[in-house]
Image: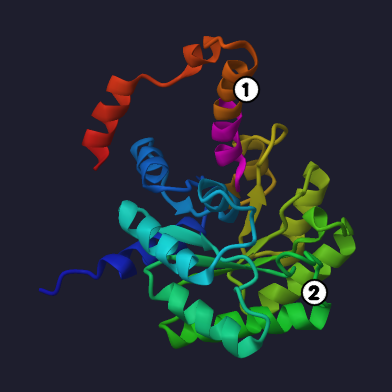
Amino acid sequence: MTAPNPTEAKRQSFRDLHRAGCFIIPNPWDVGTARYLAHLGFKALATTSSGFAWSEGRPDEQGDVEKIFAHLTTMVQATDLPVNADFEDGHAEDIDGLMANVRRACRTGIAGLSIEDKQTLPTRRVRDFDDSVMRIRAARKAIDAEGGDVVLVGRAEGFIAGRPDLEDVLRRLTAFAEAGADCLYAPGLTTDDQVAAVVRAVAPKPVNVLAGKPGFSAAGLAALGVRRISVGGAMARAAWGGFMAAAQEIAAHGTFENFAQAANGAQLNALMSEVA
């Protein structure tokens, strides 16, 4: 009997997670954070472009695409969990380049891939409606050419790109769903009413909500019909917050009180031995 293909199995389990209920998909930025999250029992992971960028000492959205492909491969191989790629705008302005990049990303073994409707730096502008829909349709075509089992997430970025227009976001997400997106995502929503409006607009397709700051709860979002919850770069920011506080204390005062909050080295070594 032929053994199941590990990549196919991860992609199938990822699709199954989107069919019912609500799951949290946290965002690690390196092998250690990915393995720790897997150790805690999460069912899937998602990369974070910002977390990865900061780990390399650069701003978000200024990454070399070759490094991004290498990072996706590393994250896919870090655990047995399915991984959703934060693929930003597809890392190409033209459609042919977008499709080539999406196909190549699929070959890293990812289980999902998101495409944003805004350009990266320096403009960070939301793309025209027709252009945005065309790019989702092209990403769908590229995924289908690679087998069709990677979950495509269509992202409407208005709320975090200076255009917090709910009606425009709903129009875009609805069009992305019709263009072939399997899951819809509008980062920056802050109220239950906004979330509920998105869920209604694209039903029955699943919705991802960003919980990047206090306010939402998993139980509350599940009650609104949300299928998955991600945290974006928030966990990386939390880690940076602890590092910066300790470093600033040392630089300013020559004291080391923030180390009281540090993880225990022996416990970390034991954990990494367990999850390696």
Residue pictured at 73% horizontal, 64% vertical: 121
Q: Which residues are magenta?
A: 232-242
Q: Which mark is residue 248?
A: 1
Residue 21 in sight in this render:
no
Viewer-closest of 162 and 1: 162
Q: Which mark is residue 127?
A: 2
**Is 57 situated above or below 154?**
above
Label 1 element class: helix
**Residue type, label 1:** Gln
Label 2 element class: loop
**Is 131 situated above or below 62?**
below
Q: Residues within 10 Å of mark 2 (few under 14, many from 20)?
A: some
Viewer-closest of 43 and 123: 123
Q: Quadrant of residue 97?
A: bottom right
**Residue type, label 2:** Arg
**Could you say where residue 44 lies in the image, as x and y percent from the top left?**
43, 51
**Is 233 situated above or below 239?**
below
**Could you say where residue 265 lies in the image, as x and y percent from the top left?**
33, 22
Q: Quadrant of residue 219?
A: top right
The earlier-in-sequence mark between 1 and 2 is 2
